[in-house]
Image (cartoon, grey):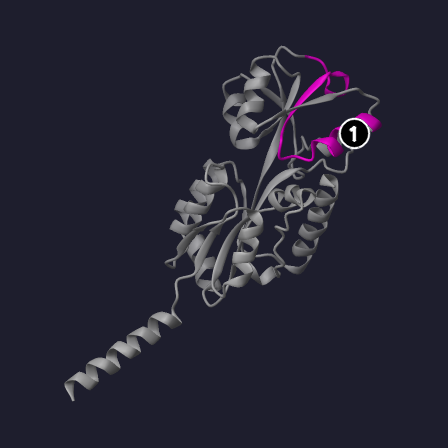
Amino acid sequence: GNNMKKITFVILMMLATSLYAKPIIINQSPKTSVMMGFTLAVQKNLGVESKFYQSRDCQDAARAYLKNDDSIIVYATDVPAAANPKGLECEVEFTKDEVVLYTWQSFEICHLPENTTALHDSETFGMSGMHPHNAWISEFNDKFNNNLRTRIFSGSGATAKGLIAKDIDWGFIASAVATPLVEKGILVCPYTTDPNSPNYFGNSYSVSLADLRIKVLVLARGADVELIREGLQNTDFERYLNSSGYSHIQYEMNDSQFEEFMKDYELLQQSYD
């Protein structure tokens, strides 16, 4: 009798754990990228236990998200857009109900305080390699009769260094990197890609990619979506986002926001082709 009870208990426990398999959380970007830190911060604040999965590349990440019933992915939209021309299929088909976090960070368009040359009269412009720089610069030059040349950097930190070293006249710098340099008086950033700001770049220069931003979604599918969405709504995580330059934070999307997001994404994707 007792042994039978034990066996029944073990079987029930096995059933319970298989019913509650831990969701996997997928890092879409390389281990060395800033998104690794972002993914770990999400994992820490999920409100449910999860297993970390480091993808081989963004195509592997997209497949892992769709293949697993319970999965979470930190999805930075410039990654699939930039990978597309390379033949990698990194897009994730998702619905608005899978969005448990939508956050973005703007870029600031900056120069040294002593440089008084307007952007449209300048010679060199620094941008990160992840941006659709060819499309951006050719449209800018067409519209403003300029011969602005882009210098490509590994990221915003390197672009800022290029500005300080006077290797470039103007640069495109993520807000988390630019803000402290502006506060110290090292850089001046008259324009931003934040469309809600009075200094919005598009108000001065009407280019189609005036609102280039780092847009990040956390997508979740499976049984725990509501728990995850609630878990992320805590002050520690919001503090992490704010200190990393993500000022805009929302935990769900309505239909019109979802449509607008998709429309912007398509425009971004075309600019890489």
**Where 12 falls versus 235 (above or below)?**
below
| Amino acid under disc 1 | Ser
Q: What residue sits 67% from the left and 46% below the top?
A: 87
- Residue 24 occupies quadrant: bottom left
Name the side, left or right, on which 188 lies relative to 234. Answer: right
Q: What residue sits 81% from the left and 20% below the top?
A: 146
Helix, strand or loop under label 1? helix
Residue found at the very far top of the displayed protein? 114
- Residue 140 occupies quadrant: top right
Residue 119 in view: yes
Closer to the camera, 183 or 99?
Answer: 99
Q: How crowded is mark 1: few (under 14 residues within 10 Å), some or many (20 or more)?
A: some
Quadrant of the image for the N terminus? Answer: bottom left
**Where 262 falls versus 163 (above or below)?**
below
Determine which residue is flagged by label 1. 138
Residue 99 in view: no
Q: What residue sits 67% from the left and 30% below the top?
A: 199
Quadrant of the image for the C terminus? Answer: top right
**Residue 91 in the image, given as x and y percentages of width and height:** 63, 52
Q: Does the magenta stretch include residue 140?
A: yes
Name the side, left or right, on which 272 lies relative to 181. Answer: right
Q: How many labels does the image show?
A: 1
Q: What stretch is highlighted in magenta?
A: 116-142
**Residue 193 in the image, given as x and y percentages of width and height:** 66, 34
Residue found at the very far bottom of the displayed protein? 1
**Residue 204 in the image, given as x and y percentages of width and height:** 75, 29
**Residue 164 in the image, given as x and y percentages of width and height:** 56, 15
Residue found at the very far left of the displayed protein? 2
Name the side, left or right, on which 62 lies relative to 270. Answer: left
Q: Is residue 244 magenta?
A: no
